[in-house]
Image (cartoon, helix red, strand yellow):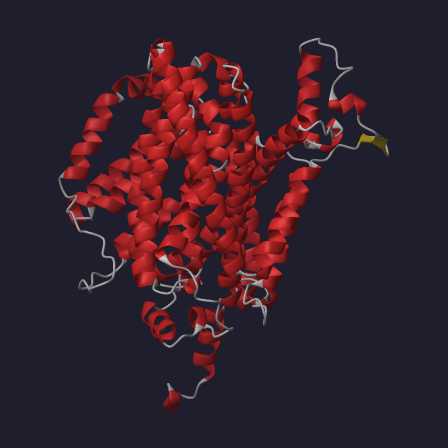
Amino acid sequence: MSNSLFRKKSLDKILKDAAEGVSDAHGDGGLNKVLTVRDLTFMGIAAVIGAGIFSTIGKAAFNGGPGVIFLFIITAVTCGFTALCYAEFASRVPVAGSAYTYSYVTFGEVIAWIIGWALILEYAIGNVVVAISWSSYFNNILQAVHIHLPGWLTMGYQTAKIAYDSALAAHQSVDGLVYTQAPVILGIPFIINLPAFIIIVLITMLAYVGIKESKKSANFMVMLKIVVLIIISVIGTYVIFSHHSFSNWTPFLPNGMTGVLKGVSAVFFAYIGFDAISTTAEECGNPQRDLPRSMIYSLAICTVIYIVVTLVITGIVNYKEFDGVADPLAFVFDKINMHKLGFLISISAVVASTSVLIVFQIGQPRIWMSMSRDGLLPKPFAKVHPRFRTPSFATVITGLLVGIPVLVVDDVLMTDLSSIGTLFAFVLVCGGVLLLPRIQKKPGRFSLPYINGKWIIPVLYLLFLYLFKQRLSDDLSNIRAAGHEEILFLIFLLTAAIISLLSFIRNYSLIPVLGMLCCLYLMIEIPVKSWMVFFGWMAIGLIVYFLYGYRHSMLTRGETKRQVLPDHAK
């Protein structure tokens, strides 16, 4: 059974079928090949420049001060290593499925299932968070034009309940809170985030109609929000220099790197969308050339934008004022009485978040589709609409999976969960590259440069130990009283030591190893409660796999057929 769990899809078979125009080696009908490098790059920007820059950037700035730009750089470098590994896979495995398909080729079926299940979590929860942010900004726009929805229609039940419980704990009045003013049905306050639900329904309909319509919408929104962010940066820079507010950048690291690293979930959440590009491989004209380029281009452009915008908002307003601010960009310009610009930012935030929703809502159904083609999910998930050429059933299920929770949940835990699921997928993608056979470079196709990590990785590991020697000493001296965070740090050090030793022995390539280690480190900075929920989700996934996926796998059918063949036919 162990061999069956780790059985792999044939890379040669996938490439052969892809060359013959057969979808993902299963022949269920092709998708429209309409995406170019520009479309894919815009799709990456659409996914990365969204709720992160208009919402979670405020939380990160409050914790890390202006120095949070270092976290953007660290995250960008981490994603850069990972993007190169994605690019290597995309050039070799030009089919839909993203990290799921890549893991199926390198690690085997059960690991591929785990990755696919993690990606479902990433895309679904990512869109829940973005939809909640979208709703907040949209409600600001409505209020600006004197349209006031009741509070119990603009937030999730969980958010209202948290505010109610916090007020009770602080012995504050709860009379004016949404939780106490909402209508009661069957003894439960009726509180839903209606705008968030409506936008998910509309985006799902757009994704259902077709990739061409979705890409046109996303491209337009990307151009609009880039223009708005350039305007913000230019005006913000002028304000900083004209008002001589450079003092807001001092101290640059008010809480040291510890404060900076508190924003890991908030900052990394901003970057998780770039891997959605790889889910559209079957809709690219030349995936082996275009996917790698678009990943690198979008990542570089987005990193520059994040760094500039962060410096601008922390230069205009002191970082301490971002505590609890859900709309930091609009907040900054309202603070300096530029209310019209603040209103424009709210509009652009709605546009930006909409483009993110489109990309994620396109990406997840294609992962469902790939898993179904392999037999790991029921057949309807692989169904391609005869007219629209989209995974129709999977798109509808994705809409329900996102639309129902967005009515009631709070977005704080959701951000951490989305980040941990993505980082987990990134670790396995980087590790998977190490298992790929070396091939000759071919013109017009990306090839990950090989840099021998034999000595570099161990030296970097020793340097890391030196820089974190105080933390290591404290954790070891208080090992019995250590909390979960300290234990995770020690586990990371042990894992990194093993990887460094294997790099020395087996001459591993530097880039994928650095990608693995960076992602693993960012994972341990995410709160432990998110780990618990993540492991619970993984456990549910394994139950589904063993009850359905293992028995219905296409590879199981292949093994069965081989077993019943007569000897002379084998």
Q: Is residue 440 visible?
A: yes
Query: Is 114 located above or below residue 325 in the figure?
Result: below
Residue at (16, 33) in percent of width and height: 459
Viewer-nearest residue: 356 or 564: 356
Q: Position of residue 231 (x, y in %)?
A: 42, 30
Q: Closest to the observer: 254 or 462?
A: 254
Vertical arrangement, residue 342 with respect to residue 108, above or below: above
In the depicted structure, whether residue 354 falls above or below residue 318: below
Is residue 105 found left or right of 114 in the rendered image?
Answer: left
Residue at position x 57%, y 33% from top? 133
Residue 496 lies, in percent from the top left, at 28, 36
Q: Quadrant of residue 551?
A: bottom right
Quadrant for the C terminus, please: bottom left
Q: How many marks?
A: 0
On-image quarter of the N terminus: bottom left
Quarter residue 182 falls in: top right
* Image position of 190 with respect to 475: above or below: below
Q: Residue furthest right?
A: 186
Identify the residue at image location x=51%, y=37%.
Answer: 417
The residue nearer to you, when weighing 43 against 264, is: 43
Give x and y (percent) for residue 334.
54, 18
Q: Could you tell me residue 62's position as x and y percent?
A: 45, 18
- Left or right of residue 397, residue 34 in this image: left
